Amino acid sequence: MRSRSGFFLFRRAKNRFAVRQRTRRAVWGGPNICLYVLRAPSRGLLTTFFLFVLASATTAHAGAVDDCNQVRDLVRQLRGCTAYIQSHPDHPGNLATAFLNRANIYARRAQYEKAFADYKRALELDPSNPLIPYNMGNAYLDRGQPARAAEAFTLAVNLDSGFALAYFNRGIARQRLGDRLGASEDFRRTLELDPNAEQARQQLGLNPRQ
């Protein structure tokens, strides 16, 4: 499966989350992107982790790319992404991918300042990719900064108006900010985009879909 940038998109999951698979069609009209929806029951938050696989690499970069693309060993992945970034490649899309993958590693380690620096750099390189602010928003929520999270999710839905997960997580952020009306609007929009989104139904106090 390729994104509009020509990169293969794969899924990554944390073992401590319950997983169910969903698909959505990207707003730019490309092929379906497989998303694994990860739910943290204690927070009611839907989190999706994306591993972006770097496109064609030169022989000189092949080792770093292989390391940055794999997810079994985070230390190796971090080393590979960093090596690729430091090689100063002339492909902005691939460089954005490396920054995003590294940002996700830092976020999982609660090294948020490093994560946000890399998310910002990835967004500078690939400003039309809604998955970058989406992941950034999740990191802000994890850090307890719902206002910044809401801003990031707003950017994600502005880039992709059909991004149901971003609407749902913005609803969670708004809920934490005390904006009950805004949160309800986001949960309802989530259901419009995905009628099977049971977490959104629960947030609205609706009966489970039969």
Image: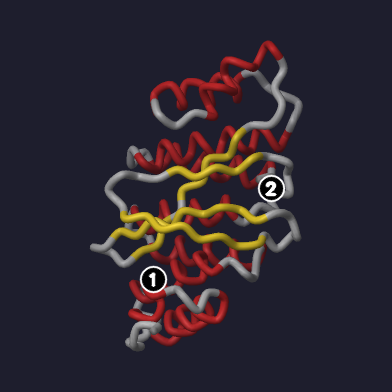
In this image, 48 relative to 39: left or right? right
Q: Secondary structure at mark 1?
A: helix
Q: Is residue 40 above or below residue 67?
A: below
Q: CA distance from mark 1 to mark 2?
A: 27 Å
Mark 1 or mark 2: name the one nearer the start of the chain: 2
Q: Is residue 175 above or below residue 112?
A: below
User: What is the crowding at mark 1: few (fewer than 14 residues within 10 Å), some, or many (at least 20)?
Assistant: many
- Residue 42 pos. (x, y %): 23, 63
Residue found at x 59% / y 23% = 65
- Residue furthest left as drawn: 42
Q: Secondary structure at mark 2?
A: loop
- Residue 37 pos. (x, y %): 43, 58
In this image, 86 relative to 145: left or right? right
User: What is the crowding at mark 2: few (fewer than 14 residues within 10 Å), some, or many (at least 20)?
Assistant: some
- Dividing the image into 4 quarters, which one contains the C terminus? bottom left
Q: Give amino acid for label 1.
A: Ile
Cβ atoms under marks 1 and 2 closer than 8 Å: no
Q: How is the image coloured?
A: secondary structure
Residue receiving disc 2: 3
Residue found at x 51% / y 22% = 67
In this image, 180 relative to 53: left or right? left
Question: Toward the viewer: 21 or 38?
Answer: 21
Residue receiving disc 1: 172
- Residue 23 pos. (x, y %): 56, 60
Image-quadrant location for residue 61? top right
- Dividing the image into 4 quarters, which one contains the N terminus? top right
- Residue 47 pos. (x, y %): 41, 57
Residue found at x 56% / y 22% = 66
Q: Nearer the viewer, mark 1 or mark 2?
A: 2
Q: Give amino acid for label 2.
A: Ser
